[in-house]
Amino acid sequence: MEAFEECTLCPRNCHVNRMAGQIGYCKESAELVIARAALHMWEEPCISGTEGSGAVFFSGCSVGCVFCQNAIIATGKSGKRITKERLRDIFLELQEKGANNINLVTPTHYVPHIIWAVTEARKAGLQIPIIYNTSGYEKVETLRQLEGIVDIYLPDMKYYDAELAKKYSHAENYFACAAAALAEMVRQIPMPKFDTRGIMQKGVIVRHLLLPGQKEDAKKIITYLYQTYKDSVYISIMNQYTPMKELQGYPELQRKVTTYEYNQVINEAIELGVQNGFMQEGATSSESFIPLFDYEGV
């Protein structure tokens, strides 16, 4: 596919020829690599419901956060090579299993394959919504290709501060890119829609994973989201940060988020007037919330 020959799908703009087997920042060539395709129960209630979300975990990542919870696949160290025809069939199989949606996890570097597979799967009877579950580090030009393909955007908004983005993701332009990307997502899907069960069919949900010691940055993000979009987007504030054993050189990240820190961010959202949002309760910062990347469903 032409887009892979001098790849600029994400803001890294690597310009490598992935068709020739070269890899860029995402750690992947043009070959599709997937680590898991299965019903996933741990998304927001309007995504997972009681039936589960049909989560397809792609290997590789264009961001590469030092604290990544799914590092084994984000770094390209796990996954099985498949064809785009197999990806189409996986979508249909997940629908047969009762999935509420097809949840494309870390999909950016495979957008051309995804467009083809979704289009062909719909011809073959795929009817459930398509979710684009992303780090938020996106290019508007790439997102425009997904108009009419994606029904629900599920981006992160990781950092407001450029120094934090540089330190933890080597992407000091993260907020500028994520903010522009979100504006494009909302342009495509300006208002949420739900079915009679309360399962989202159209919409945008923005996630923020609170990091240890970063409640002030989190407050800035929540304020930006609400002042810019009010209730046209849902805001999901997450406390599930898990210190990974492999993380070294960042002592400030080698602890969990405290209840006090999390409550401070939640209180900020309440004071702002956020109504369309999600919060997490209880002990979610556990490695048990990280899926097994055992090639199930691949």
Image (tube, rainbow, N blue to C red):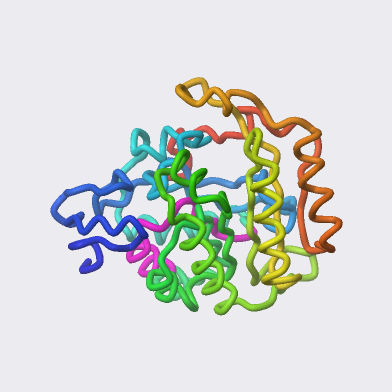
Question: Does the magenta portion include 105?
Answer: yes
* Residue at image location 43% in from the left, 51% down from the top: 172
Question: Does the magenta portion include 78?
Answer: no
Magenta span: 100-119
Residue 14 percent coordinates (x, y): 25, 55
- Predominant secondary structure, magenta span: helix
Q: Is residue 99 above or below residue 35?
A: below
Q: Is residue 99 left or right of residue 132?
A: right
Q: Is residue 198 left or right of residue 142?
A: right
Task: Give whichever of 237, 215 is nearer the camera.
Answer: 215
Task: Give whichever of 242, 212 is nearer the camera.
Answer: 212
Q: Point out the image quarter for the N terminus.
A: bottom left
Task: Give whichever of 269, 43 is nearer the camera.
Answer: 269
Q: Is residue 139 above or below residue 207?
A: below
* Residue at image location 65% in from the left, 28% down from the top: 286
* Residue at image location 59% in from the left, 74% down from the top: 186
Residue 93 visible? The answer is no
Residue 161 percent coordinates (x, y): 55, 50
Quarter assignment of residue 242: top right
Residue 82 percent coordinates (x, y): 31, 49
